[in-house]
C-alpha cells in the first residue's frame, strides 16, 4: 500500500490486512514498552490545513510509537498563510526528507493531488479532506465494531451481516462517506438517517438505504450499531434544520430513543460529542457506548496504516 | 530443479522429542521454562515442544508466540508484510528461561529481531534457542542451543519446512542448488 487516500478504492483484503495489523498494534499499547523500532529513521509530517487536535495527536502518537520522527506543520501562522501553494509546501517538505505526509485539508481531493502530482515521493495518508473522506476514522470505527462483535477472535473476520445506522449530517460528513464505503466492503449493511436537507443530492452513490425518520429506521432495521455524527455548530446558521431542540427531538439519541434500541446495539460517535444535541447522556455514558474505545483504537489503526504505507520497499508496493 | 526430502514426519517428531529432553536436561527440570515460537511454523513447533516438556516432566510448561515483523532489519528491502500476533503466557517472561523456537536457522537476523522483541516484552533470566534445522550461513554471531538437524546447504538451495497445523503434509525438503 503506497498511500491511503480513500476507503472507496480499498478492497476487502486490503481493509482486513489493515485491521489485522491494527490488532497487533493494539497489543503493543498493553505492554510495558509501548514502542516499536519499526519506522526508526523515518520522518512523518503532519500537514494540517484545518484545526484538528484530536486527529493530529492520534497520528502523532501512532508515529511516535513506531519510532518515527514527527514534524507538525499547522497551516495557520505558517508560510501557507503568507500565500504558499500546496505544491511549494509539498516540495519544501520533500526537500526536508519527509517519508510520509499525513494531510488534513479543507479542499476535497487535496491528498489525491499530492499523491498523483509527483511533487513528493512520500507516502500520503488522508486525514480528512473537505467533505470527501476520512479513511482512518472509518477504519477505526470498523475495527471497534469488529472487536465488540468478535472479541479476541477478530483477526481475519469481516462485518458480514452487521446492520449499521449512521445518523446525522451526511451531507458534510466525510466520516459518513468513508464509513459507508468501507462498511459495505466489509459486508455490513448501512442505512443512513438524516433530515432531507442534510443528505447529499446523489445519495445513491453511497450504496446505502436512506431513511428520514429515526424511530421508523430503528424499528425497521433493528440496528446492531448506531453511529451518531456530530452536528457542526458552525453550520447551524445555514438553516439546515429549524433549531437545535427540534434536531435533538427528531434525530438525536436521547434517553427514550436509546431505550428503544435492540438491547445489544452499540452506540458510536466520532467525537467530540455535543451532549444534548445529537446524543444524550444515557447513550453516551452507557457501557454500550464505544466513544472512548474509538479514541484508543484510533492510535492502533493509524499505527497499522503508517506501518503498511511507510515501512516496506516503496518501489514495489502498489 | 530437484527436491529431496531430508526429514520425514517421523524424523521431525523424533527430533522434537530429543530437543525436549535436552531442554529439560540443560535447565535441570521444567522450572521457569517458557517456550515461545516465532510465527508461523516456529509457533507450531513451540506448542509441540511445550506439550512434550509438560508430559515428560509432569509440570505444565507455558508456551506462546513472539512476532518479530516490527523488529526486522530488512523491512525496507521487501514489500510490507503483515504482522502476526504475539501471545505471552499469563505469567509473562520476567525472570523466566525463555526457549525461542524457529523452524530454520539461517542468517541469524530473525533471531536478532526476536531478541529485540523479547527485551521489549520483559526481562527473561536467560534466552535459549531451539531450531528444527540449522542450515548454516550465519551473518551474525548467533548460534542455536538445541538443533533438530544440521543441514549443510549452499546459499542457492531452498529449505522447505511443512508442518501439520499449517500445511497439508509434514516434512523438511531441500530444493535446487547444484544439479545432482
Image: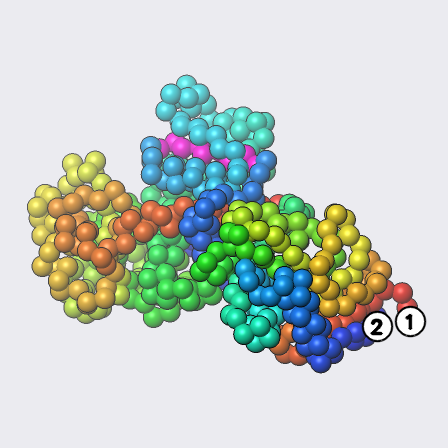
- Chain designation of label 1: B
Disc 2 on helix, strand or loop?
Answer: loop
- Chain designation of label 2: B
Which residue range is magenta in the image? A42-50
**Do the dots labelled 2 and 1 sit on one chain?**
yes
> What is the chief secondary structure element of the magenta stretch?
strand
Q: Which residue is mark 1?
A: B180
Mark 2 Cα-neighbour bin, 10 Å: few <14, some 14–19, many ≥20: few
Q: Viewed as shown, does residue A57 lie left or right of A245?
A: right
Q: Is residue A211 magenta?
A: no
Tag 2–tag 1 contact (CB < 8 Å): yes
The residue under the point 91% across, 71% down is: B180
Color encoding of the figure: rainbow
Q: Which quarter of the figure has residue A74?
A: top left
Disc 1 on helix, strand or loop?
Answer: loop
Q: Viewed as shown, does residue B70 lie left or right of A251?
A: right
Distance of mark 2 from mark 1, alpha carbons?
A: 8 Å
Residue farthest toward the right in the current orientation of the protein:
B180
Q: Which residue is mark 2?
A: B2
Residue A70: x and y in percent read 49, 33
* Residue B127, visible in the rendered structure: yes
Return the mark for residue B145: none
The residue under the point 58% across, 27% down is: A95
Residue B100: x and y in percent read 62, 59
Q: Is residue A285 above or below residue B164?
A: above
The residue under the point 37% across, 69% down is: A160
Amino acid at each position: 500500500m503506497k498511500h491511503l487516500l480513500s476507503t472507496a478504492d480499498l478492497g476487502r483484503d486490503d481493509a482486513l490486512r489493515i485491521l489485522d495489523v491494527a490488532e497487533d498494534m493494539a497489543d503493543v499499547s498493553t505492554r510495558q514498552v509501548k514502542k516499536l523500532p519499526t519506522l526508526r529513521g523515518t520522518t512523518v509530517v503532519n500537514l494540517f490545513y484545518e484545526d484538528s487536535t484530536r486527529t493530529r495527536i492520534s497520528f502523532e502518537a501512532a508515529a511516535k510509537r513506531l519510532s518515527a520522527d514527527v514534524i507538525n506543520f499547522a497551516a495557520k501562522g505558517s508560510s501557507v498563510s503568507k500565500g504558499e501553494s500546496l505544491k511549494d509546501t509539498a516540495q519544501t517538505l520533500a526537500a526536508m526528507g519527509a517519508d510520509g505526509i499525513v494531510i488534513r485539508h479543507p479542499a476535497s481531493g487535496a491528498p489525491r493531488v499530492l499523491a498523483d502530482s509527483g511533487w513528493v515521493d512520500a507516502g500520503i495518508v488522508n486525514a480528512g479532506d473537505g467533505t470527501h473522506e476520512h479513511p482512518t476514522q472509518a477504519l477505526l470505527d470498523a475495527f471497534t465494531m469488529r472487536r465488540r462483535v468478535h472479541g479476541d477472535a477478530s483477526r481475519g473476520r469481516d462485518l458480514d451481516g452487521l446492520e449499521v445506522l449512521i445518523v446525522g449530517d451526511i451531507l458534510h460528513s466525510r466520516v459518513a462517506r468513508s464509513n459507508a464505503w468501507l462498511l459495505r466492503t466489509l459486508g455490513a449493511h448501512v442505512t443512513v438517517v438524516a433530515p432531507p436537507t442534510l443528505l447529499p443530492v446523489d445519495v445513491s452513490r453511497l450504496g446505502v438505504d436512506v431513511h428520514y425518520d429515526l424511530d421508523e429506521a430503528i424499528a425497521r432495521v433493528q440496528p446492531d450499531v448506531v453511529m451518531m455524527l456530530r452536528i457542526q455548530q458552525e453550520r447551524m446558521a445555514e438553516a439546515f434544520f429549524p433549531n437545535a431542540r427540534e434536531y435533538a427531538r427528531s434525530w438525536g439519541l436521547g434517553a427514550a430513543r436509546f431505550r428503544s434500541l435492540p438491547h445489544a446495539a452499540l452506540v458510536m460517535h466520532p467525537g467530540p460529542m455535543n451532549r444534548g444535541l445529537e446524543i444524550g447522556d444515557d447513550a453516551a455514558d452507557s457501557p454500550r457506548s464505544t466513544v472512548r474505545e474509538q479514541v484508543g483504537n484510533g492510535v492502533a489503526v493509524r499505527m497499522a496504516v503508517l506501518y503498511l504505507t511507510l515501512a516496506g520497499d516503496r518501489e514495489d508496493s502498489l | 530443479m530437484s527436491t529431496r526430502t531430508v526429514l520425514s514426519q517421523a524424523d521431525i517428531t523424533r527430533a522434537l522429542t530429543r530437543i525436549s529432553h535436552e531442554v529439560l536436561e540443560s535447565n535441570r527440570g521444567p522450572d521457569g521454562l517458557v517456550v515461545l515460537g516465532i510465527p508461523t511454523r516456529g509457533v507450531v513447533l513451540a506448542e509441540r515442544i511445550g506439550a512434550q516438556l509438560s508430559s515428560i516432566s509432569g509440570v505444565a510448561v507455558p508456551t506462546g508466540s513472539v512476532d518479530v515483523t516490527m523488529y526486522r532489519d530488512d523491512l525496507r528491502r521487501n514489500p510490507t508484510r503483515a504482522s502476526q500476533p504475539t501471545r505471552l503466557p499469563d505469567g509473562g517472561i520476567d525472570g523466566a528461561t525463555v526457549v525461542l523456537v524457529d523452524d530454520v536457522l539461517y542468517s541469524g537476523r530473525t533471531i536478532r529481531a526476536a531478541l529485540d522483541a523479547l527485551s521489549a516484552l520483559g526481562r527473561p533470566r536467560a534466552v535459549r534457542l531451539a531450531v528444527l534445522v540449522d542450515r548454516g550461513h550465519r551473518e551474525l554471531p548467533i548460534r542455536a542451543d538445541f538443533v533438530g538437524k544440521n543441514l549443510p546447504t549452499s546459499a542457492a538451495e531452498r529449505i522447505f519446512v511443512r508442518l501439520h497445523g499449517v500445511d497439508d503434509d509434514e516434512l523438511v525438503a531441500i530444493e535446487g542448488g547444484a544439479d545432482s
